[in-house]
Amino acid sequence: MTIPPCRASRLVALVPLFAVALAHAEPPSKEECVAAHSRGQDERTAGHLALARQQFLRCAQGACPRVVQEDCARFADDLARTLPSLTFAARDDGGADLPDTRVFVDDRLVAERLDDGAAHDVDPGRHVIRFVHDGRARELTVVVALGEQARAVVARFDARPAPAPAPTATAPALRPPPPAPPASPRRVRPGGARLLIGAGTVLMLGGAALAWYELGQLPPGCSLDRHTCAAPPGDPVFDRASTAVRWFDVGVGVGVVGAVAAVAGVAWYVGGTRTERPRVAIAPWLGGDAVGLAAATALP
């Protein structure tokens, strides 16, 4: 059977399209050629043009019967003119190509890398294209028209942010000490006045207690005001009365001395108060990143 010149030219034109894909494949048997011819027509009827063309390219090989081969070559040629195709590229934000990128069309892996720039047949309609590079993914949705050839689909990957530098342990910088709050003047009471007030109070209370006690020891019939006793001369009551009067006088004297001392202590305590002014001490100060003068206040 002689192949018409037009068909021969189509076969020659189809050789570059499927020679690479089938270079390392085993030639199909006659039964496989017939099955591919039938499946290709079924896929074309179902609208799966890309799968149909793959079947027709398989049965268009020279190992197939000539009648089948001619039909498959013609069908593949017809689909080649109408079947859409896409080309894929991945670039970073600087425009550099990223060939180590995988491409999935509708979750089907179609390219392990993007080194060859080849076009990939797809059916007309809507498709989800997913690019995966360095663990990151970008998805694009495209709608491909019938007969649209080698449409470029490009994914952009932003540069990864540079890792933050690890914190280095540094000694904390010394800061100048906070200024000391200004000390207010202090009123100082004389310490001797407190002692004099305490001693005078003790003497006054002790003398009063002694006088009161001795007053109670005065015998009946004796008058402290008149210094007389209603008793015959030589009666021992006169000795007891004399002793009581004597110790009464001592108690009164001690009480008076204590009262005078307490009053004097109070007067000294009130009148002897003095005001002490704070002293300001200034010394040089040296820190990790600053030098200066440190001031402190202290009371004398």
Image (cartoon, helix red, strand yellow):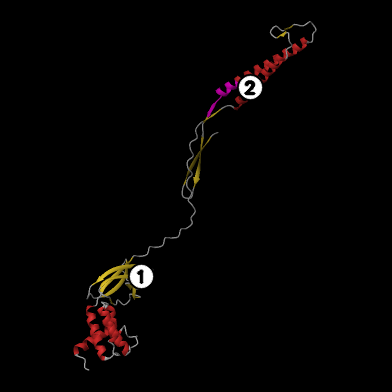
Q: Quadrant of the N terminus?
A: bottom left
The quarter of the displayed image where residue 40 is located: bottom left
Span of residues in magenta: 264-275
Residue located beneath label 1 in the image: 132
Please state the horizontal and vertical placement of residue 35, each as a whole percent of the image. 30, 86
Q: Residues within 10 Å of mark 2 (few under 14, many from 20)?
A: many
Task: Tell me the number on the disc at residue 201.
Answer: 2
Nearest to N terminus: mark 2 or mark 1: 1
Query: Disc 1 on helix, strand or loop?
Result: strand
- Residue extending farthest to the right is 234
Measure how far apart labels 2 and 1 are at the Cα level: 101 Å
The quarter of the displayed image where residue 140 is located: bottom left
- Left or right: 94 with respect to 292? left
Please state the horizontal and vertical placement of residue 211, each as a whole percent of the image. 69, 16
- Left or right: 125 with respect to 162? left
- Of residues 173 and 1, the one nearer the viewer is 1
Task: Tell me the number on the disc at residue 163.
Answer: none
Q: Amino acid at mark 1?
A: Val
Query: Disc 2 on helix, strand or loop?
Result: helix
Q: Amino acid at mark 2?
A: Thr
| Helix, strand or loop: magenta stretch | helix
- Of residues 41 and 147, the one nearer the viewer is 41
- Residue 270 among those drawn in magenta: yes
